[in-house]
Amino acid sequence: MKKYTRYFPYILFILALVLAFVTRFYKLGKAPAGLYLDESAQGYNAFSILKTGKDEFGKSFPIVFRSFTDFKTPVYIYLIVPLIPIFGLNSFTVRFPSFLFSILTIPVIYLLIKKVSRKQYLALIVTLLLAISPWHILFGRTNFECNVALFFFLTGLYLFYVGLTKPKWLIGSALFFAIAIPSYHSQRIITPLTLMMLFFRFRKIITDKLHFKFLAIGLFIGLFISLPTLSVIGTPGFLARASGLNIFAFNNRPPSGYLTNYTGPLPWLINNNYFLSLREFSSLYISYLSPINMFILGDSGLRSSFPNLATFFFWQLPFYLYGLYLLFMKMEKSQSELKFLTIFLLIISPLPAAVTRDPYSTIRALPLVIPQIIIIGLAIQKLLSYVKNNIQIILAAMVTVILLVYSLGKLYSSVIILNEYYRAGEWDYGVEQVVTVINDLHTNLPIIFDNARLEPYSQIAFFEKYDPITFQQTNFEVTSKDYYINMNRVKDKKIGNITTRTINWERDLKVNQYLIGDELAISPEQIQTHHLTLIAEIKYPDQSVAFRIVKTNPQFTPEKI
Amino acid sequence: MKLSKIAIIISLFFWPMGLWLKNNPGDFMTYLLPAVLLLLAYCLYSYCRDKQYWLIPVLLIPYLSPKLLLLPILVITILLIIGQRKIFIWLALGISLLGAVFLFKPFWGQTIFKPDYEQTQQVIRNIHLYPSILLARVYQNKVRIITDKFNHNWVSLIDPSNYFFGFHPREDYLDNQNLDKYPYLALPFLIYGVFLISKHPNKLFLMTVIVSSILALSVLTNFDRHDFILYIPLSLLTIYGINKAKINNLVWVGFLIVSIEQLIRLILIKL
């Protein structure tokens, strides 16, 4: 028996890796079935960088990508670039970095927990929990930068702890932390706070003779990597996300609870921005630690959640509550570092998300998955420590297998079945099919793609693999000098004979051309009234109409409509 | 007067004040009286805990609010489970079960066990999406309609957002008054009180009543306003947390400024 138990940790670790791989790789690029505009924009900009060394606006190697003037973080886009020659420009390629770094996070979390707690089984339990975590899986299957950033952050953290005993690893730690910062917006807050904490907590060790040299080199490298980011830090582009979503930006939007029509006494107190913002921030912050959000509701964003699945499995709730009790009341002294790190991450991880107005935004708060999984892991490990005799071992193994099988089934149910059926529209399903139909038409006639509710240009350019040089020349928006400063957009784009703009019925019906729009833009009544020829109808999996492609018939159109 | 005492008084104002301002007096009494009975039970428990007289007011609660029919039954069941099997408790169980027979009809219509046509149709629609009937039965079945509602309710009832932020920023609860039941800065004190509950002199009363109330409210289609029954035990825990916390006066001053502003806002907006 002892011979087998020796291999048990390896088996568990391999199981965690296999589960992580299966849950993230199965139908990668195919489910979710569509390709959201942010994903295609990242992919097309990577394609543009590969072909021209410039992004879609003709800017050479941008530090943050202008895109829809949301100024996307650069690391993910640059990670896609070398993948395009290997896998081609497709949905799989743009989601692959998320998948890869999600898988790489699994051994990193194992090493980190083992290093900090010195408890192998706790590390294995946490690793296994992360492998099947719905929260981590979601961002491991789709193109979101947060997962890549989490990998760099955790690796930096792990290497720092290694560096305490082997100083040269401090250089590696600085390198990973420096890459984490530009990887995702929320890391601009989390990483510096973590660095400050680590410095104050371990200042005596890292400033001693042995460590100082490596610390200085690490700082130099970190600063060098951060130079490009620092060069644009004050520009409107860099601050676009923070100023647009910030709850303290009173000019954009008054805080929650502000009564515009209030005419009663003490209006300065009733509508006091500072009091109201403090309450709003507190409620947003607490929402990230709230059991109802974690175990029942999940993220309200339809692309950052799966149907019928919260961020954690419901069966994990009792463990979470017990784990909280253990963490704060019953933690062994030998686990003080794990306790400190868990509480620290628990406190700082919701901060970047809590200053933005969306409730329980799991994208921005992804690092929170780590302390919350540790808490659940603590409880499971404690309960397993009571398992002594063979019958208890068999029972525990049976419960574990049942929970694993149930969780995997639940993931399949929500991620593959329900999400595909109910949320295809959220992932902009249909644009790829539209592009296929357009290409099959082999036409030189103008094509108008309605962009009143959508912004399909990046998807069209992506699926058409449209020549980036031509795109840059025909879709001028800003000069290189104004790239990070000018926040004005040109929404209408031209991709060959396809133009994305709102349909102008009066003018467009008089031209022999194709019109493409969603159910609201081109209804069956409009087809009948305007004598349009229906070319194709693209439907969502639930059989509702995603897009209609019609051809105008100017010969039937009266002079005035 | 100590600043911590003022903080306690301010904290205790919120929930009854909010409930009173948002409801007509008749309805308000429906929610208030069960809490008053529970307060009486707490007093009886504090002064003569060897006897079980505190159960008498608890037994009366369903007659004032039939939605809380299960509360006394659950309280007594918990006492029996933990080994308090005196004749008086068995008698109380008999009385509460007898009362349940008369109050069952108005109670049943307000529970999650009432058939839900829309949810049932949704389950049937979803079942057709699955490739295997086994998978469909496990993850989409009619029993889950009830268990999901039950889980949603009890987790909401242990959620701080319910008590301190009126469910903000997820105020998507149907027919919920979204009351700020305590000043939000009192949250750490309630949590501290919960963590120290095992050291509370009346821990048996508090734990029994809290668990029973949460379970009794979780079977309701809408627990809002009836959750005022939790005002007594949660306030006791908050008071306990405040009393046990060692905090300097400057923090209390900050607490009072923010909480008084919140209370004034609560009153002025409703007037």
Image (cartoon, rainbow, N blue to C red):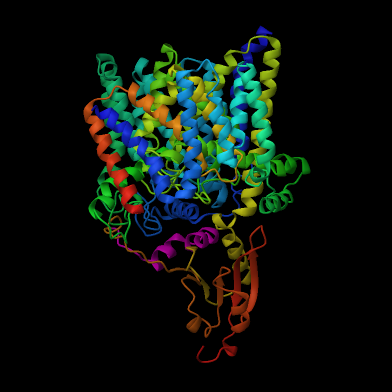
Expressed as whole percent of the image width and height from the top left, the position of residue A338 reads 42, 20
Task: Identify the image quadrant of residue A264.
Answer: bottom left
Expressed as whole percent of the image width and height from the top left, the position of residue A237 reads 31, 53
User: Which residue is drawn at the image coordinates 59% and 50% (left, top)?
Assistant: A32
Expressed as whole percent of the image width and height from the top left, the position of residue A524 reads 63, 76
User: Which residue is drawn at the image coordinates 73% and 48% (left, top)?
Assistant: B127
Give whichever of B261, B21 is nearer the camera. B21
The image quadrant where one finds the C terminus of chain B is bottom left
Residue farthest toward the bottom in the current orientation of the protein? A559
Query: Is A509 positioned to the left or the right of A436 in the image?
Result: left
Q: Is residue B174 above or below residue B188?
A: below
Give whichever of A361, A465 is nearer the camera. A361
Residue A471: within the magenta?
yes
Q: Is residue B235 above or below residue A365?
A: above
Task: Identify the image quadrant of residue B111.
Answer: top right
User: Can residue A127 be spotted in the picture?
Assistant: no
Residue A88: within the magenta?
no
User: Which residue is drawn at the image coordinates 24% and 25% (left, top)?
Assistant: B248
Expressed as whole percent of the image width and height from the top left, the position of residue B71 reads 58, 33
Q: Is residue B125 above or below residue A345?
A: below
Principal secondary structure, stretch drawn in magenta: helix
The image quadrant where one finds the N terminus of chain B is top left
Q: Which residues are magenta?
A: A457-480
Q: Is residue A386 above or below residue B72?
A: above
